[in-house]
Amino acid sequence: MSRVVDDDSASQLLKRVGDARKEATGDETPVHHTLNMSPETRALPFVLSFLEDFFSRTKTLLNDICGEARDGEVMAVLGASGSGKSTLIDALANRIARGSLKGKVTLNGEPLESRLLKVISAYVMQDDLLFPMLTVEETLMFAAEFRLPRTLSKSKKQARVQQLIDQLGLRNAAKTIIGDEGHRGVSGGERRRVSIGIDIIHDPIILFLDEPTSGLDSTSAYMVVKVLQRIAQSGSIVIMSIHQPSYRIMGLLDRLLFLSKGQTVFSGTPSDLPGYFGEFGAPIPENENKTEFALDLIRELEGSQGGAKALVEFHKGWQIKHKSNLHNIEGAPQDSRGGLSLKEAISASISRGKLVSGATNTDASPASMVPTFANPCWNEIVTLSKRSVMNSRRMPELFGIRLGAVLVTGFILATMFWQLDNSLRVYKND
Ligand SMILES: Nc1ncnc2c1ncn2[C@@H]1O[C@H](COP(=O)(O)OP(=O)(O)OP(=O)(O)O)[C@@H](O)[C@H]1O
Ligand SMILES: [Mg+2]
């Protein structure tokens, strides 16, 4: 399952990312060039591994799932509805109650503390919860003020927003309002990219997304995944769940994990799929979408008497045979992390411009290298209030209706206590 990365292409990629950043921000600080490209530190410094059984106390939702995601790559979790995709993403993102999960999630072979994970990762929800009357640029700017530290100058925040607008392919829509049912605004695909932008404003190392393409047409979905590929190539691990990716989207995915009723039925690269199903005895016909065929086959097996158990068992054997099972990696952790400890990898990332959080303390433990909260509470309240006021000012009719409703309710309540007698008589019924 491990992917051999060509030295030249990896260094060219890093250079391209650095050049793009310089163009976008005018920032001359060395980014990826600073990374020593010696065999130990080249290419993929981050490896997120997960092992063993994840399960809930009362009902097993995920069982015996293992896999590995590397930076620079997009990993997709696929499966029918109810197969456990969201549960797996939530489990990896530490959004499931503590104690209800068994198993292990490691980053570069080291256990991942929840505090550290919170700081270095981002989780993009399926719904777009945005203020309709703010423009794309304003929305991202408020996110920058909220998520990036106060110590970072306004011009640097603006530069980050502009860089992000280019990265998300939102240049043409930058001055357009988000919109809602009553106001025309950006398209659905653009809105989804704005939602992603808000969560990646601090340039996280790990990005989790639950069905980022659902509800989008194939072109918008392709553009969203293309953006995710660009984010991955800037040095992040991207893990997402997706329903039936199109042929073109498949070309952007580096690793696939197919689930059936909480169990792995395939994990590997898209190019492994034909060989895998061929060996299983169900070769993928030519000119057929590989994922659609695989999902249909899994659904068929689930409906049959033995369920998808045969495929689960076949997958176990196949992984051992192809020496790509995570258990092998566990036996050789040095290989999986490319020689970089978690601390070294995080400081290398920070020096390349990731985790825009003003973190400088590289001597400390990984958890204390980056602050948990970028800003104090009062600062967050001021930013959120400003955003709310700006949104309301642009929708005076809605503001008027809400104010009217509050005044009428207040008036009704006030009349109940109007000119009340102070004597004890009011407490008696007579
Ligand atoms: N708290 C819970 N108690 C019992 N069962 C649960 C609980 N939460 C989730 N499940 C079950 O776990 C299974 C996996 O749910 P999950 O949301 O991960 O599916 P999914 O693959 O994301 O589906 P979809 O594609 O529809 O989003 C479902 O069958 C669901 O009913
Ligand atoms: Mg889901």
Image (cartoon, helix red, strand yellow):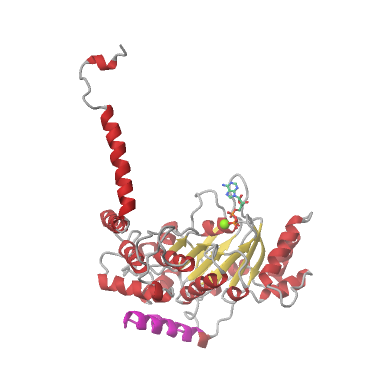
Q: Going by the image, does 298 lie left or right of 238?
A: right
Residue 20 lies in the magenta stretch: yes
Q: Is the magenta stretch mostly helix, strand or loop?
A: helix
Residue at point 62%, 60% (across, down) = 65
Q: What span is in magenta?
A: 10-38
Q: How many marks?
A: 0
Q: Going by the image, does 271 lie left or right of 87?
A: right
- Measured as percent of width and height from the top left, residue 357 is found at 33, 67
| Residue nearest the observer in this picture, 170 or 160 | 170
Tell me the quadrant of the picture where the C terminus can be found. top left
Residue 149 lies in the magenta stretch: no
| Residue nearest the observer in this picture, 127 or 178 | 178
Residue at point 58%, 46% (across, down) = 57
Residue at point 26%, 56% (across, down) = 382
- Measured as percent of width and height from the top left, residue 13 is found at 47, 83
Seen as rendered, the residue at the extreme bottom is: 8
